Amino acid sequence: MRRSLRHSLAQELRARIRAGEWRPGERMPSEPELARRQTVSRSSMRAAITVLEEEGYVSRRHGSGTYVTHRPALPNDLGRNFGVSSHIGSQGLRPGTLAQTAGVEPAPPAVAEALGVAEGEPVSTLRRVRTADGRRVVDVTDWCRTEHLAPEDLPASGSIYAALAARGLAIDHGVAQLTPRNADGEVAARLHVPSGTLLLTIDQVDRTADGVAVLVSCEHHLADAFTFTLLRRGPGDVSEEER
């Protein structure tokens, strides 16, 4: 019941922030005042604000109060494989696409190796910037074999996963590598950030259930736009030497 109450309170506060009741940078009413207005305990309201803080909607400043942030972070579960647009939409934000180019390009070495084609062989290439409520948050490049998706079949704004699935190439799993990087001139320009801005780059190869590699992706995420979570199971029963 306590968990349900704090999430219910957090949902209401989140909606009020999105509606503009408290603007970015503005201090919210104190916890006792918010609790009094909602006729709940101060501990319940504190727990609700903690939820919003974890989501990136607010920040607490010791001795000053709770402030609405300018850009709430988008939580991203690293254990799940889904498209950027569906992830943005799941957070109640409006996904969008900018600076899109689609065509055929020579396969770079790493892409050729992953797709099982010769280096330099033509592959379909889709590059686009994904936005959340108009803010540029991810620069994405996707590569696939031309017989899987021809350039004219690459989605203008939707999910490339859906386009592949429509051709009987549903993605079963992907293997990703995460690397912190700094935005260079081209990526910085596409994301409208200063050169050197911290990014989290995800290089991923997606495969069908029978192990066929059908998609190679490189996603440059703005580090301050996302929070990444990872479920780490175990270790369960371990020996004293392993602890």
Image: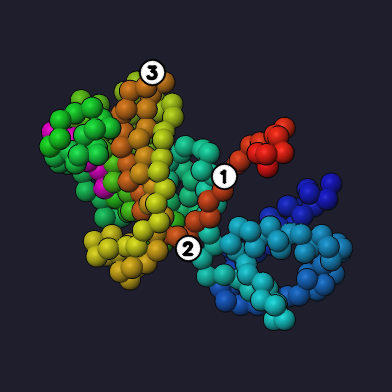
The mark that comes first in sequence, 2 or 1, is: 2
Q: Secondary structure at mark 2?
A: loop
Residue at 32% in and 62% down:
183
What amino acid does circle 1 point to? Answer: Leu
- The disc at residue 184 is none
Q: CA distance from mark 1 to mark 3?
A: 26 Å
Examine the image and state in which quarter residue 72 appears: bottom right
Tell me where residue 195 sits by quadrant.
bottom left
Which residue range is magenta in the image? 121-127
- Circle 1 residues within 10 Å: few <14, some 14–19, many ≥20: few
Q: Position of residue 224 (x, y in %)?
A: 47, 63
Residue 120 is left or right of residue 213, and the answer is left
Q: In front of the other: label 2 or label 1? A: 1
Q: Residue at 36% across / 49% down in the picture?
A: 219
Using the image, tell me which numbered label, if any, was put on residue 224.
Answer: 2
Q: Which residue is denoted by mark 1 in the rendering?
A: 230
Q: Quadrant of the C terminus?
A: top right
Q: According to the image, label 3 marks what residue?
A: 210
C-alpha gap between disc 2 and disc 1:
17 Å
Magenta: main secondary structure equals: strand
Is 205 displayed left or right of 117 in the figure?
right
Left or right, residue 14 beside residue 88: right
Crowd rating for badge 3 (residues with CA inside 10 Å; few <14, some 14–19, many 20+): few
